[in-house]
Amino acid sequence: AAGVIQSPRHLIKEKRETATLKCYPIPRHDTVYWYQQGPGQDPQFLISFYEKMQSDKGSIPDRFSAQQFSDYHSELNMSSLELGDSALYFCASSLGRGAYNEQFFGPGTRLTVL
Amino acid sequence: AQTVTQSQPEMSVQEAETVTLSCTYDTSENNYYLFWYKQPPSRQMILVIRQEAYKQQNATENRFSVNFQKAAKSFSLKISDSQLGDTAMYFCAFMKQNTGFQKLVFGTGTRLLVSP
C-alpha cells in the first residue's frame, strides 16, 4: 500500500539559510499534519491543512510557513535557519478530519543546521 | 491545554515476557482519543493501538492491550509475549474529539528494550 512520502530524507543547511521540506500524502488523503521532533524529544505539532486550507496551528515559528497544493501535497518552508531547528520533521496524512481518522506518518526528514 | 506524562524513560523486558508501559494525561475534555505509537530505530511512527474515551471496553490489538482508567486519567499499554521487534520508543498521545482538525499531543516517550 502507498505510504506518505517525504523528501528529502536528509538535509544539511547552514545557519541563516532556507530549507523546503515536501510531503506527499497517501492518495485520496486530504488532510496533512506537520510535526517537529527534536533530539531526544517527543513530536510537537506545527501546522495542519485540510482541503488546501490551513486548519490548525501549533508552535510553529514565524520563520516557518507552509501550504497545501491542489494535488494535496504540502511544503514546509523554513527561513533564517537556526541551530535549534535541527530536528526530524514528520508529515502525516489522513482521509478527512477528526480524531477517528487515523494519521499515517511519513518516514520524516532529518534536518541538520550547522 | 492537554498534557501527557510518561514517567518511565526506559524499560527492559525479556523475550516472551509481558511488560506494561504507563501513561497519564490531564485534560478538561470529556470526549477524546488516546493512542500508543511505536517509533523503532528507523524513526518511523507507527500506530499501535487507539482508545476512544467514550468506550468503556479496553482496546486490544493482538499482543497489545490497554488499561484505560478514565477517572484516573490513566492509559497504560500492555505488551504480551514480547518480541525482539518490539524494541522501540513508545509514545502515548492524546487527541480531542471535537469537530475540526485534530492534532496529536505526545508524551515524552518510553524506550523499551526487549532482550533475548
Image (tube, helix red, strand yellow):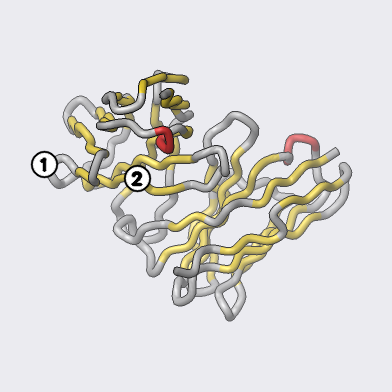
State the residue in front, A100 or B19: B19
Which callout, 1 or 2, points to the residue nearer the camera? 2
Pinpoint residue B60: horizontal percent, then vertical percent: 20, 43
The chain letter under disc 1 is B
Q: Quadrant of residue B110?
A: top left
Residue drawn at (47%, 26%) of the image: B111
Task: Please tell me whether residue B5 is drawn above or below residue A16 in the rendered image.
Answer: above
Residues marked 1 and 2, same chain:
yes
State the residue in front, B85 or B116: B116
Residue on which the image places disc 1: B56
Pinpoint residue A4: horizontal percent, then vertical percent: 53, 63
Judge from the rendering whether residue A18 lies leftward or rightward of residue A31; answer left or right: right
Residue drawn at (69%, 54%) of the image: A9
Judge from the rendering whether residue B107 lies leftward or rightward of residue A81; answer left or right: left
Residue drawn at (38%, 48%) of the image: B47
Q: Residues within 10 Å of mark 1 (few under 14, many from 20)?
A: few
Name the kind of residue labelled 2 in the image.
Val
Q: Earlier in the sequence, mark 1 or mark 2?
A: 2
Residue drawn at (45%, 58%) of the image: A104
Label annotation for residue B48: 2
